[in-house]
Structures are given as structure tokens and as C-alpha cells.
Amino acid sequence: MDETSRTTLELLYNISRELTSDLDLRTVLSRVLMLSSRHVGAERASIIVLDGNQAVEGALIVNDLLLERSVEHWNNVLQDGLAGWVFRNRQAVMLSDTSQDERWAQRPDDAVSRTGAKSAICVPVMAREQVVGILTIVHPRPHFFNQEHLALVQSIADQAGIAIYNARLYDSLQAVTRRYRELFDDSIDPICITGLNGQILESNRQAIALTGYPAEVLVGKTMQELLKLPAEWLKDHVETLGAGQTLHQEALLWTASLSTVPVEVHVRKVAFPNGDVLQWILQDITERKQLDALRDDLMAMVYHDLRSPLSNIISSLEMLNMLLPVSDDENLRALLSIAIRSTGRMQRLINTLLDIYRLEAGQPITSRAMTEIAPLVYEAVDTILPVAENKGQQVDVQIEPNLPPLNIDADMIRRVLINLLDNATKYTLFKGKITLSVYRKGERVEFAVRDNGPGIPPDALEVIFDKFARLQSERFPKGIGLGLAFCRLAVRSHGGEIWVESKLNEGSCFTFALPIPQTEDGLSMKNN
Ligand code: ADP
């Protein structure tokens, strides 16, 4: 290997070392320029860094001195001159005599009368097929550069391209990390990051404010300690967390001042560069808890203060109805039956609200009794019949003979039936047809309420059973969206199931199935 090849290799090696030694692009580029210009004895070397069509940075070395230039200056250089030509044409250029080439923008010191003609090499710096910079090396003598110099400058440019690309990646990674930190700190909810054992590694501003502990005290405490969770709590849920699911748990947070704050905790496993961690979001639910307490008080008020007087009114109205002589005024009897029906409706609504509240709280049904199906079904039908007749709707009832009695809360199941029949009359247009079929299927009795109403869109078939779910339509009468939620709670708490099948513009069929009670010998009851 001759001396030139050896020093060239050395130069490339040094440049590559410089390029990987630092991620601050400006520092790296100026050192690369310095090394290259010294190597060829250049008078001037510059590199312009581009982002798209814009210069975003540059470095210039003149006679071994690093000179400062503004971004504006580098953008001007790109407009004309050799660098501009190379940028537009994505092609390397070697000029033997700058005074003979019009692409060379003459500077005052290029005048022949001063330092005179020079030679120059200008190459595009590429990364991933994009021009990310322009590298220029100028020698004070014309005809100085040869093909080897060009190849060398091209190799330097190739390495610089990789360095610029890496520095950009590093910058965007830094930006993402900064953004994450901002999001973490600005989150409305308190967040703690812990190891897989629950030991706190980091907490955001809100977590520090909520717990009342300074950040440095929080680090090292465990979430189990702060939330008074059983020691094994995390171990018990390791599979759920491992499967990427979020754990939700209500708990009391013990603050630095030894007071407690009710919180809803959401824990999730997150992959961090240094390994998996747990992210704990702590939602302060003080207000929700206060509202719950208020709701409980309100329910108690409804239960005691509305239910008993309403029962008294209903029994008085029924008594009046019985006492009214048969010969008496028809109008009076009609008025009385409206009052009885309306108060009955009100009583059903109150009982339904109370049932929703109790069943949601997980209370079991206490008033179950063996109940004959047919009378219960007819009572429900009788309740809605006046409304259906008013709308000119036909109601057909088909009850399979010899159905076994069911062990149910009769009042509750009657209200389920009334709700379904009521909806069928409510949502079906005039002259609709409603069919209620009751039949045995395996070890269950099914109750199916079919109508020829507007039907329900497929994506709403599940949703309508949620509380306050209502389908939007100008044509439909207003409701509060609690009827079907109650039906589902009531049927499920009897060990049954409820579902709907529907076709738009053809009608819907709501069906619920209740289990037939088993006798002691394990056989289902027969109604003989
Ligand atoms: P509400 O009747 O008070 O709105 P429900 O819980 O009983 O509440 O019903 C929820 C929604 O389901 C209704 O608003 C209606 O959009 C839809 N729905 C219920 N029954 C029927 C039916 N038979 N035909 C068409 N839509 C129905």
C-alpha cells in the first residue's frame, strides 16, 4: 500500500470514528470538514444540511477556521452557485478551474486579480435515497483535484449521510421522549409507573399532589402500600396483566396526611426500553362516591315515601271501583279505571327503578314462589290491552298447555312481560300485530313477544339492553331507556336469558327463557 492510500484510509477511519462519537450534528460535521480539508490541503470546505428543500444547518471552514453562517445564508447558497446546481441535479461535480465554469458563483476573493482560479469538488450527501446535504471542498489551485479526490469526497459524503440520518433519528426520539414526559406530567389523572412488583419508579405531578408525598419519597414505596391492597394482589392478577389486559379496581388511597381518597385504579403492563413496567392510573372518585351516596338516599326516599302512599291510593281506588254500584254512571267508572291504570303504571315504574338499583347492587331475589304461568301471562296482557286496542292493534296469546310452574318473583317477571308488550305496542304503528307465545324448550320455558313494528338495526341488538340506551328516531315516542335494562337484570337474576331477533321494517321478537325448577330427584317439574 502506498503512502497516499494509507493516509486516505486513515482519514476515512478517523472520519468514521468522529461520525459515531457524538450525536450533536454540528460538532460532528465541523470536525469532519476540518479533517477532510486538512487532508487535501483545501482552502475551504463546507457542508449544508437539508430537510426537504430547505437548508437547516451548515458548517464552513476557511483556512482551518470554523466560521459561523446563518441558516438564511445557507439557503441563499442553495439558490445559485455550484451547491445549488448539485442540489437540483443530485449529481457530483468536479471543477478543474472555477473561473471557467459559470456554475461557480464568484466570490470577491475568487477574482483572478486576487487569489485567482481554484478547483472544487461538490457532491450530494445522500441518505435513504434523499439528498440530505451538500458537501463542497475547494482547493486554492486550479487542476488540483483528480478522480481519487472525487472518490474520497464521495466516501466522506456517504458517511456523513448516515451520520445526518442517525442524528435526525436521535432528535426525533428525543422529541418523542420529551412529548411523553409532557403528556405524563400534564395528564389530568395521577399516574405512577412501577416495577412488576409494584414498587414506584416514577410519578407525575398529579400523583404527587394527590398522595401528598414528594417525588423522592414516593420512589421506593409500593402501590400496594399506598392503596392498602392485599400483598398478593399483583401476583393474583399476573396472568391478566401478562395478557395485555387492564385491571380495574376500586380502592382507598392513603395520603401523606393519613386521610383516605376513594380511587378507581387502572393497572396495565407497558413495555419500556429497559423492560416491562406497570402503569397505574388513579382516578379520584370522591365525587362519584358522593353521588352514589346521594342516589342511595334518594332511592330510600322513593322506596319509603312514594311507594307506601301510592299503594294506599291504588287500594283505595280499587275499593272505590268495587263499591261503585253497577248501575252507576259509566263516565265515572271510565274515569276510575284511568286512575287505576295510571297509578298502576306509576307503581310499576317505581318498583322497576328499585329493582334495577337492588339487582345492580347484587342483591338476590327474596320473594320467589312457585307460580303458574298462564294467569301471570294473562295479567300482563290485560295491563297493556287497553293501549293496544286504542291503537287498533291485535294481540294474540299462545300458551302451550301443561307448562310447569316456575319458581319466580311473579311481580318482577310480570313486569318484564309488561315491559316487552308495552314496547311492542309503543314502537309498532297503528294496526300492528303482537303475538305472545309461551312454550317449553328443553329445561326452560320461553316467552316470546313478536311484533310487526319498525325492527332494530343489527348493530343495536345488544346495545338496547344497556341502561339509558335509546334508538334515535323522530317517529318514536319518548322513553327513558330503562325498560330493557331492567328486563335483562330481572331475567338474569332468575338464572335466565333474554335476547332479540329483528329485521328492519319487518318487526322484532324479544324472547326470554327461564329455567324450570328441578325436583329433589333431579327431574324437572311437570304440571299434571
Ligand atoms: P324505552 O322504551 O324507555 O326507550 P327500553 O329499554 O324499553 O326503553 O328500550 C330501549 C330502546 O329499544 C327503545 O328506545 C327503542 O329504540 C328500542 N326498542 C325496544 N323495543 C322495541 C321494539 N319492540 N321495536 C323496536 N324498537 C324497540
Image (cartoon, rainbow, N blue to C red):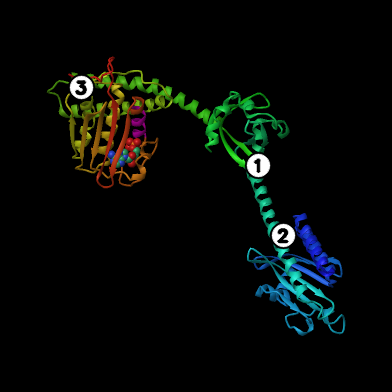
Does the numbered disc 1 mark a residue whose Cβ is under 8 Å from ligand 1? Answer: no
What numbered label is drawn on residue 321? 3
Is 420 positioned to the left or the right of 171 in the image? left
The circle drawn on residue 163 is 2
- Quick one: which residue is furthest to the top in this view? 520
Residue 136, position in %: x, y? 76, 71
- Quarter of the rendering occupied by the N terminus: bottom right
Q: Which residue is mark 1?
A: 185
Residue 343 visible within the image? no
Q: Considering only vertical position in the picture, is 161 above or below 273?
A: below
User: As rendered, which of 402 and 204 lies closer to the eye?
Assistant: 402
- What's the residue type where badge 3 is placed? Asn
Distance from the alpha carbon under mark 2 to that under mark 3:
96 Å
Question: How many numbered discs, if any?
Answer: 3
Identity of the residue drawn at 33% across and 47% down: 474
**Classed neighbour count for the residue bearing mark 3: other residues with Cα under 10 Å, few (<14), some (14–19), many (≥20):** some
Q: Residue 117 in the image: state x and y as whole percent.
A: 82, 82
